[in-house]
Amino acid sequence: MSSLDKIKIIMSQTDYSEEKATEKLHEWNDDYMNVIREYLNPKFQEKKPKKLKSVNQEMMSQIRNYMDNIATEYEKRKANGENSKN
């Protein structure tokens, strides 16, 4: 994709002028997606802090996931068992 095409894409997705789009494109090393992401969310590169769970929350999540997996596997075995009997 040529630089002119990238500038046109940036201009259509943002309100940047041609000069501003060219400047931002050079700033982001010809990565037009990052230019658009920066326009939409200037802090897009910042990592969101991980939400820490308490021991009890983590334990209950693990139990819930385990029981969900057991129920899913049971339903699969039940469906396969019913199909093989017929």
Image (tube, rainbow, N blue to C red):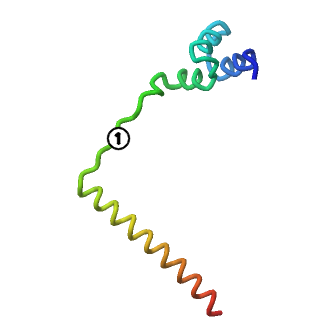
Q: Is residue 83 above or below residue 73?
A: below
Horizontal relation, residue 5 to residue 32: left or right: right
Residue at the spot 28% in from the left edge and 56% down from the top edge = 57
Quadrant of residue 56 within the rendered picture: bottom left
Question: Considering the image in quadrants, where does the N terminus appear?
Answer: top right
Q: Is residue 36 above or below residue 73?
A: above
Horizontal relation, residue 85 to residue 44: left or right: right
Quadrant of residue 18 within the rendered picture: top right
Residue at the spot 32% in from the left edge and 43% down from the top edge = 51
Q: Secondary structure at mark 1?
A: loop
Residue sitting farthest toward the top: 19
Question: Considering the image in quadrants, where does the C terminus appear?
Answer: bottom right
Residue at the spot 64% in from the left edge and 18% down from the top edge = 30
In the image shown, does 27 or 14 lie closer to the viewer? Answer: 27
Residue 4 image position (x, y, % from top left): 74, 15
Q: Is residue 15 above or below residue 40?
A: above
Q: Which residue is mark 1?
A: 50
Residue at the spot 63% in from the left edge and 13% down from the top edge = 21
Residue 10 image position (x, y, % from top left): 66, 20
Amino acid type of the residue tagged 1 in the rendering = Lys
In the image shown, does 1 or 82 lie closer to the viewer? Answer: 1
Residue 69 image position (x, y, % from top left): 44, 69
